[in-house]
Image (spheres, rainbow, N blue to C red):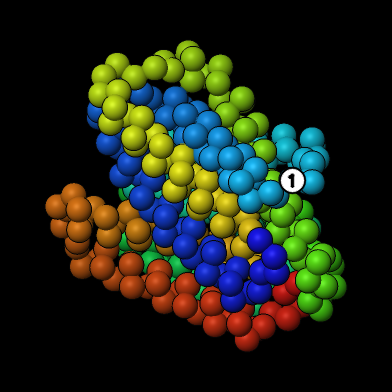
Amino acid sequence: MTHVSVRRGMLYVTIAATIWGTGGPAAALLYRLSGLGPVAVSFWRFVFGAGLLFGAARLLRLGGWRPRWSGLLTVGAGLAISQAAYFAAVAASGVAVATVITLGASPALVALGARLALAERLGRTGAAGMVLALTGLLLLVGGPSAVSATGAGLALLSAVAYAGVTLHSRASARPDASTQPAPVAERAGAVREAYGTAMWGFAAGGVLLLPLAVVEGLLPSGGEVATVALLGYLGAMPTALAYGLFFTGLSSVRATTASVVALLEPAGATAIGVLLLGERLTAASAAGTAVLLASVALLALGESRGDSRAGKYA
């Protein structure tokens, strides 16, 4: 929780995206065993995640940081809307279409917002990495198919909310607006604030999701032990750990780069499906996974070499 270099920030974001890939399979098991709906699962995920983050903050003595209420509401609402809209898009148009639109639109929205609001340049390596990532995503999920207007709108809403959270967190976590590294103490404060953003953001998101979760059904209809175990996993790994690493990584990694690296999530989910759930890996899916990994490697190379120097620390 001290100084986070660009290289370490890339590692954190990559680990976070990889862990996110386990969230979908865990949620699918929860729906099957517990009878809970997507909003209720998201609510309990936020509750478990926030509780673990608060406990870790107390254990690691990370006090002394107080949330900015405007930022807290922005992050909490963004996380809640992104989760709920994505699950609703899956119900309306299916997993493949919702994934293509949500994850495909997010990097473009973040890149545009980062250029306009944060003066971050994409650079040639970043542009090439984004093209590779979107190509790999289309291959991985099987390419475009029929899209309903409702599903497309919900998926785009999820992408906008995710982009807003990423941009806000990057703006809050970056240490200064210069192109030079900030003092270690200042960057350590940025890391602490990034951790606090994740912690309080999930608390606020849980509060916002509570009314909808109550309407949908807050308690499981069966498999209570397995449900608690899976919810604990969702709260601990894809929520508390992954988002904590992601927000911390944003203190040194550009917002656009982080949003593209996050596309590793469907690649991780595909690997789990093949290795653990007995699913078959098609040639297109294998190619898409390889292209996605190549895009992340290219972006990591660009960050380490400072391909887009202007805005690297901005």
Quarter of the C terminus within the rendering: bottom right
Q: Which residue is mark 1?
A: 63
Residue 306 visible in the current orientation? yes
Report helix, strand or loop for mark 1.
loop
The picture places residue 112, in percent across and down from the top left corner, at: 68, 60
Q: Residue at x 63, y 58 (%)?
A: 248
Q: Residue at x 66, y 74 (%)?
A: 5
* Picture quadrant of residue 170: bottom right
12 on left or right of 63 = left
The picture places residue 272, in percent across and down from the top left corner, at: 27, 55
The picture places residue 49, in percent across and down from the top left corner, at: 52, 39
Q: Is residue 152 above or below residue 34?
A: below
Amino acid bearing label 1: Gly
The picture places residue 125, in percent across and down from the top left corner, at: 58, 80
Quarter of the N terminus within the rendering: bottom right
Q: Is residue 33 above or below residue 249?
A: above
Residue lying at the far bottom of the rendered structure: 305
Q: Residue at x 56, y 25 (%)?
A: 209
Q: Is residue 28 above or below residue 62?
A: above
Residue 128 visible in the current orientation? no
